[in-house]
Amino acid sequence: MNQMPTGMPLDVEVGQMMMLGFEGELPTAEFRLFIREYRIGGVVLFERNCRSPEQLWSLCAGLQDHARSFEPHLPLFVAVDQEGGRVLRLGPPFTRFPSARRLGRAGDETLVAATARAMAREMLAVGINMNLAPVLDVDSNPENPVIADRAFHAIPAVVARMGVAFVRALQEEGVVATGKHFPGHGDTAFDSHLDLGAVEKTAEQLEAVELVPFRAAIGAGLEAVMTAHVAYSAWDKEMPATLSQAVLGRLLRGELGYRGMVMTDDLAMGAISRRYTIQDAAVIAVRAGADMLLLCAGLDEQVRMVEVVRRAAEVGEIPRERISSAAGRILGCKQRYIFKREPRPQEEVRAVVGCPEHIELARHPVLATGQET
């Protein structure tokens, strides 16, 4: 998982650090040109981009062909939030997998792994190579408006066991796993999509709860971590984790020894955008230790973000080695998961997506307790 020298010019390295969303079932000509001119590293898909498995296969294949047509060695990360339960970006006929809470309550790591493998197979069938999952937050605050059943459990050790099983299964199948939301979004009463929340625990309390699942997943080879737009006064009294060198550098890279990719949560979310411009936040996040910047705002904002980060690196506001180390981690992960992977034939899509085996797994008797929210 070590970073590798890229041999790429600055503008290409900066472009590789971008994970961007777009509207519609096909990217506009302007967005396609943007991918080409700025050598964008990845795209994230939502329900708005997906009409059917066949359409999604064509979309992903077209995006990869477009990216490889000018940089054969720089395929795209194609990411989606496919957690299970209420966060499933791929709708029917994709299998409706159970929530993390149901899996955690079942207490069966074999079942968790089987679910993650089935998810991965359906994703790979249509060309998606990165899952923005699993949630490694601990469900420790009943007032939490955004995590709840997205977490495996309220007991850190259970979250750790289930999270590790999920991560290993995804990655063994060939999908990059992204543990979120570091260093833990479970004990907040705020939705970071709307505003900034804070966790007022001591470092010892955070170590005993929030960090347990992340430490375990990192030990299991987790390829990517997504940051939380949450403030942790025990580590940084000024900055939310996404923008904090103390959290991303000293804690994650230093104390936890993490060597994989660090991705921000969407920089357009209220916890960040109500306090910073997207451009300022992007520069601060990269300086703090973020490798990929996630932004699902409009094309104009995305272009400005790329240009501001590049200019900041050109004038030394962001150290050149910080850009190169980020791009090196990204390129290394792409070599491990994407370079040698041939696209699946479109005829196989329907044989995998929503197949009887996956539906039977999702309806496992152990999981049939209560309704998903």
Image (cartoon, rainbow, N blue to C red):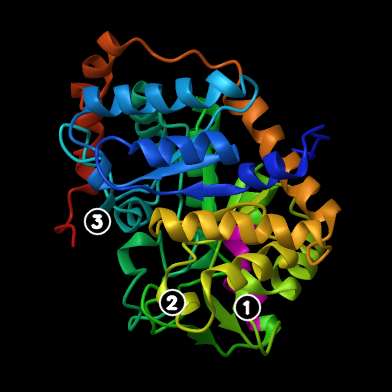
Q: Is residue 156 left or right of residue 215?
A: left
Q: Is residue 152 left or right of residue 39?
A: left
Per the picture, the main secondary structure of the magenta-coloured stretch is helix
Q: CA distance from mark 1 to mark 2?
A: 12 Å
Please name the amino acid that badge 3 sits on: Arg
Q: How far across and down, in percent of the image, does residue 307 sit?
A: 62, 56
Question: Which span of residues is magenta-colored?
Answer: 205-214
* Label 1: element kind: helix
Q: How far across and down, in percent of the image, does residue 366 sit?
A: 25, 45
Q: Nearer the viewer, residue 193 or 311?
A: 311
Q: Are marks 3 and 1 in contact (CB under 8 Å)?
A: no
The numbered mark at residue 140 is: 2
271 versus 135 height, above or below: below
Say if residue 252 shows up in the picture.
no
Q: Quadrant of residue 114?
A: top left
Q: Is residue 213 magenta?
A: yes
70 versus 96 height, above or below: above
The numbered mark at residue 86 is: 3
Which quadrant does the C terminus fall into? bottom left
Dot 1 surroundings within 10 Å: few (below 14), some, or many (20 or more)?
A: some
